[in-house]
Amino acid sequence: MSKETRLTYERSFSQLRAGWDMGLARKKTHYVMRAAGLYCMRKELRQLLRESKKILKNGITGSESHTDRAKLYGEKIAQAAKLLRRIEDFKGLAWGNISDKQAHFHERSHKKKAATDEQLKKFYEAAKRSQFHDAFQLIEFTGARPQELEKGIRVELVKRNDSLALRCTIEGVKCDGKKKGLDIRSVEIPFPQHASIDIKRRWHDLAHKAKSGLVVRVDKTEKQTAGQRITNAFKTTSKTAGVDVAAYSLRHRFSAQAKQSNKGDAIAVALALGHQTTKTQEHYGRAKRGGADVSPVQVVGIDLDIAQIRGATTKAGPPTHIREHSAFSKVVKSTSTPPPKPKPKGMRL
């Protein structure tokens, strides 16, 4: 268990002891509180058992008698038995029940919807002075996962087809050997000519900063990961703006734009989203989701030599006009893991 998780559990357990109201919490909070309570109470139980074992192991000293030692041991065992009953009662609470299911559905569902232009206009008005302003913009234009900003996203201004484009290089966080996501991906966003004026301004803002080299990174703290900091920043800013915008509603928006600009090419969309399989994108924003409420922005997923996309596609690969083979060493200075060998077509991994 990581240090951040332990700290989260300890903070949650303190809230439980202070009188946490289960009825007002969401299902996800129920899960965290249950895990925190079991972890901390089991930790106390192990400590009591260690102390009772130490009592038996140590010899009698001074005026202490066998009766005193047995009494002390009995008290520790009684405390452990009482705590064990508390743990069983705690596990038996109605953790799956949610008093306000409609509020929970609303809280959960907005993260699966593409953020609209009108929502983003209000959101960025409230985010003008936020230290995460650049991070918000990058998540909008690249669909990056919040935790990926801990490793940093590099932004460059490049030329493509006689026009300028933002090239963003992202190191994935779902590259844990379970074939969930790409280790690294690169996305290009040409100037959005057909988008709203606000989106054009945000693109120009990033382009101006990228001229002198731009790497956007969010550091973790002792109590929070980079992903948690950004998620909380989204919650705070959205509350101030009076809109429902989360990091993943921007990722769904990016997915809708990627599918619109790469019609019929599932592999190109997978490259842009950082997926290792074309199946995963079915759960993300569709090309027509939001209709006219989501401005069209062209998204180009760069086909790196290391990218191995699995799954069905209507084409053999990304269109030739957006295919670009880049050496892995040009993107990452060093790596100890060789790129995977391509599998024959039809073979399941």
Image (spheres, rainbow, N blue to C red):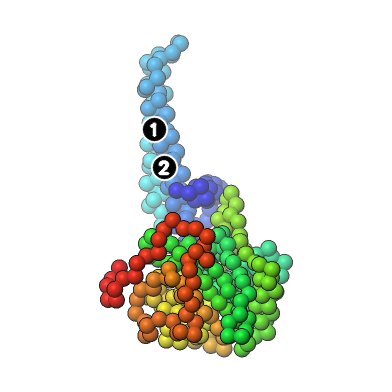
Q: Left or right of 128: which side holds 345?
A: left
Above or below 78: residue 309? below
- Of labels 1 and 2, earlier in sequence is 2
Q: Secondary structure at mark 2?
A: helix
Q: Residue furthest right?
A: 129
| Mark 1 neighbour class, 10 Å CA radius: few under 14, some 14 to 19, many 20 or more | some
Q: How many labels, in total?
A: 2
Q: Is residue 55 visible?
A: yes
Q: Which residue is mark 2?
A: 42
Q: Amino acid at mark 2?
A: Arg
Above or below 39: residue 270? below
Q: Which residue is mark 1?
A: 49
Locate the C terminus and report the quarter of the image it occupies.
bottom left
Residue in the picture at 51% in, 62% down: 332
Residue in the picture at 58% in, 49% down: 222
Q: CA distance from mark 1 to mark 2?
A: 11 Å
Q: Residue furthest left?
A: 347
Please state the horizontal and vertical placement of residue 266, each as a whole percent of the image. 41, 81
Is the residue under label 2 in contact with that under label 1 (CB below 8 Å)?
Answer: no
Above or below 274: residue 257? below
Please state the horizontal and vertical placement of residue 17, each as a whole percent of the image. 53, 46
Residue in the picture at 44% in, 46% down: 39
Of residue 277 and residue 7, the one placed in the foreground of this image is: 277
Q: Secondary structure at mark 1?
A: helix
Q: Amino acid at mark 1?
A: Leu
Image quarter of residue 346: bottom left
Please state the horizontal and vertical placement of residue 200, each as a whole percent of the image. 66, 82
Image quarter of residue 87: top left
| Mark 2 neighbour class, 10 Å CA radius: few under 14, some 14 to 19, many 20 or more | some
Please state the horizontal and vertical placement of residue 69, each as a whole percent of the image. 40, 19
